Each structure stands twice: as structure tokens, then as C-alpha cells.
Image (cartoon, grey):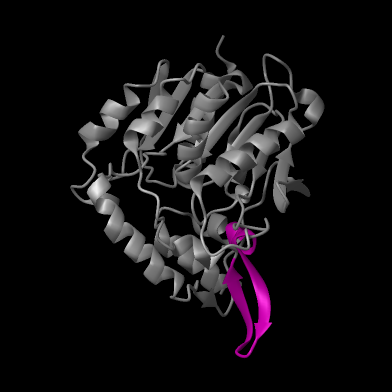
């Protein structure tokens, strides 16, 4: 049985923008006239296998209304898939650059990214520092460092993946999607899972009847043939001129993803490359901290973004 869904305090508006030949889904809150030089548009970008609507709970928890935009990355949510059999990190940078030209031409914005989105915004802020007034990274840790000798195995994995059909699981009801969300994140409240489920999936007719399919291109699951080059990433981070707020959950354990391949000490050394850094740690939150503790996160954001 589907639980009663969360009620949005500030419902979003939905529209589509063509960026680099693909139709991107963009959500917005607040009037564009609210954006000023001192309090510009806040742009929020989600992580892997998530959607822009994921930020609804944080937007609702902000004390003051402001102009906010969230986008579904290519191949996620209601945005077009790339049409290719693989996805490339530089394309996210290109899409973000095009989005800023479309929604805030010639203006600086406040920029926030979660997980994969956090990695994108950190690199982008170093490439276009004049476009960013404040930067927020929600657990965009980056990836373990790689070595050149790892390239053959990675490329072989990618070639094998290209020959392997990729699929995402589908569900027989919205309640099943909500249960999946809560299984992935046990801290997610049932009402929030019920609200997210129809934003995270779509009903389709098929041989098995009506089923609910996750709004993500399965091609995202293929291995990336390009090695993660830490030195190149840090060269971008060192160019960031905006104040940066790093936020993590108290319950997040990096080892659950990478084991001993990415020690915490390595990540701390990377953060040291950021010129202006503030930190926040949210108690009772894991990696999906914008779902787990939206009120606490909103308070941190408000203080950081409104500071002189």
C-alpha cells in the first residue's frame, strides 16, 4: 500500500530547455525577479541516478524564498538521453555551461551539487570562476586515484560493457518504487519516498502489463574508459575563487564504496587545494543528506549563502 505522500510547501515549476542539442528538464522555485547581485539564482545539481526534484525538501525548509533552479542531468529524470552508448564527464561541464548561459546570462550564480553533481560543480567553478559567487559541495568526494598502468584493464572492461545490454530494474507499482528508495536509503521517510517515486520513475505499457521504470539511461552503468586523473582535477579545484562550503553526513562511510582504495587522508589532502573552504557535518545523515536532514542542511545553506 502506498503511504501518504509528502506535501510540498513550495511547489516547483517544470519546463524544458534545449542545451547542446538535447532537451533538458529544468525545475524552478521562486520568481526570477528575486535574484540580485547579492542574492543570485541558486542552481542545484543532483547526483548519479537521482533527479532535480530530489531537492524539494531542502527548498521547502529554507527560511526565505529565493530564485532556485534544479536540472535533470542528461540521461536522468525527464531530460533526453545522449543517444550514445556511454556518458562522458566533460559533457556535464558543457551542459552546465550552456544552462548558465540560458538562465543567467552574464551573471554569477550560487552553485550547489550533490555527489556526482558535486564533482561537476567543483571542476566547473575552477574553469569559470567568474560565474560563481558561492559554491556548495554535498559529498562530491571524487574517485580513487588511478595509475597509467590501469588503462588496459579499464579499456577492456569498457569494450566488454559495450557488448553487454544494460538494464535498470522496473517495478509493478509506485509503492514498489517507494520501497526501493527506502531500501537504498533506510533514513528516507515514507512520505518523502512516496513523493519522490513518481518523479523518479514513469509508468509504461509492455509485455508484462503496466510497470514503473526508473528515469535513468541504463548506459550510465557502463564503465568509464577514461581514468580519473587526480592531478588534473586538483588543478581545476585550485582555480576556484568563490567561497566553498563542504557538507557531509555523520553516517557516511567512504569505505563502503571504495574499501581501502581511497583513504580519507587522500580526500582531505585534495580539499586542502581549495582556497576558501568551510565545513559542515550533519548529524543523523548519510550520503543522501538532502533527504535525511533537509532542515539542518537548509539552515547551513542559508547561513553560508547569506553571509557577507
Position of residue 303 in the picture relative to residue 147 (left or right):
right
Q: Whole-percent x and y of residue 261?
A: 21, 47
The quadrant of the rendering that contains the N terminus is: bottom right
Q: Nearer the viewer, residue 5 or 280?
A: 280
Q: Relative to 3, does residue 42 appear above or below in the rendering?
A: above
Q: Relative to 165, does residue 101 appear above or below in the rendering?
A: above
The residue lying at 40 percent from left, 26 percent from top is: 235
Q: Whole-percent x and y of residue 73?
A: 60, 50
Q: Whole-percent x and y of residue 188?
A: 46, 54
* Number of numbered tags placed on the structure image: 0
Q: Nearer the viewer, residue 103 or 124?
A: 124
The quadrant of the rendering that contains the C terminus is: top right
Q: Nearer the viewer, residue 146 or 293?
A: 146
Residue at the outermost left position? 260
Q: Nearer the viewer, residue 301 or 122?
A: 122
Q: Is residue 14 visible?
A: no
Query: Main SS type for the magenta part?
Result: strand
The residue lying at 37 percent from left, 40 percent from top is: 142
Q: Is residue 266 visible?
A: yes
Q: Is residue 197 magenta?
A: yes
Q: Relative to 178, does residue 302 appear above or below in the rendering?
A: above
Q: Is residue 203 magenta?
A: yes
Position of residue 16 in the picture relative to residue 280 (left or right):
right
The residue lying at 50 percent from left, 29 percent from top is: 136
Q: Relative to 231, does residue 278 appear above or below in the rendering?
A: above
Residue 217 sits in which quadrant? bottom right
The residue lying at 27 percent from left, 29 percent from top is: 268
Q: Whole-percent x and y of residue 53?
A: 63, 49
Q: Which residues are magenta?
A: 195-214
Residue 171 sits in which quadrant? bottom right
Amino acid at each position: 500500500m502506498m503511504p501518504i505522500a509528502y506535501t510540498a510547501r513550495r511547489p516547483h515549476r517544470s519546463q524544458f530547455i534545449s542545451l547542446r542539442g538535447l532537451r533538458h528538464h529544468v525545475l524552478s522555485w521562486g520568481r526570477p525577479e528575486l535574484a540580485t547581485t547579492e542574492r543570485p539564482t541558486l542552481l542545484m545539481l543532483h547526483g548519479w541516478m537521482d533527479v532535480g526534484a530530489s531537492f524539494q525538501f531542502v527548498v521547502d525548509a529554507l527560511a526565505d524564498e529565493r530564485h532556485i533552479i534544479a536540472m535533470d542531468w542528461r540521461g536522468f529524470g525527464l531530460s533526453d538521453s545522449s543517444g550514445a552508448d556511454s556518458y562522458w564527464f566533460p559533457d556535464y561541464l558543457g551542459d552546465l555551461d550552456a544552462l548558465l548561459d540560458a538562465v543567467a546570462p552574464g551573471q554569477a550564480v550560487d552553485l550547489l551539487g550533490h555527489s556526482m553533481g558535486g564533482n561537476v560543480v567543483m571542476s566547473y567553478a575552477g574553469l569559470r570562476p567568474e560565474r560563481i559567487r558561492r559554491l556548495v559541495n554535498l559529498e562530491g568526494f571524487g574517485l580513487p586515484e588511478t595509475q597509467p598502468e590501469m588503462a588496459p584493464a579499464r579499456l577492456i572492461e569498457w569494450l566488454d560493457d559495450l557488448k553487454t545490454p544494460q538494464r535498470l530494474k522496473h517495478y509493478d507499482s509506485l509503492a514498489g518504487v517507494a520501497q526501493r528508495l527506502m531500501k537504498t536509503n533506510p533514513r528516507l521517510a515514507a512520505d518523502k519516498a512516496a513523493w519522490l517515486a513518481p518523479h523518479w520513475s514513469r509508468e509504461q505499457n509492455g509485455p508484462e502489463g503496466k510497470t514503473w521504470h526508473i528515469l535513468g539511461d541504463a548506459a550510465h552503468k557502463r564503465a568509464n574508459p577514461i581514468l580519473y586523473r587526480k592531478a588534473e582535477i586538483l588543478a581545476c579545484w585550485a582555480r576556484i575563487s568563490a567561497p566553498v562550503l563542504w557538507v557531509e553526513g555523520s553516517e557516511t562511510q567512504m569505505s563502503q564504496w571504495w574499501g581501502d582504495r581511497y583513504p580519507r587522508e587522500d580526500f582531505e589532502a585534495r580539499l586542502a587545494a581549495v582556497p576558501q573552504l568551510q565545513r559542515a557535518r550533519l548529524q543523523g545523515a548519510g550520503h543522501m543528506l538532502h533527504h535525511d536532514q533537509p532542515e539542518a542542511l537548509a539552515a547551513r545553506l542559508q547561513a553560508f549563502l547569506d553571509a557577507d
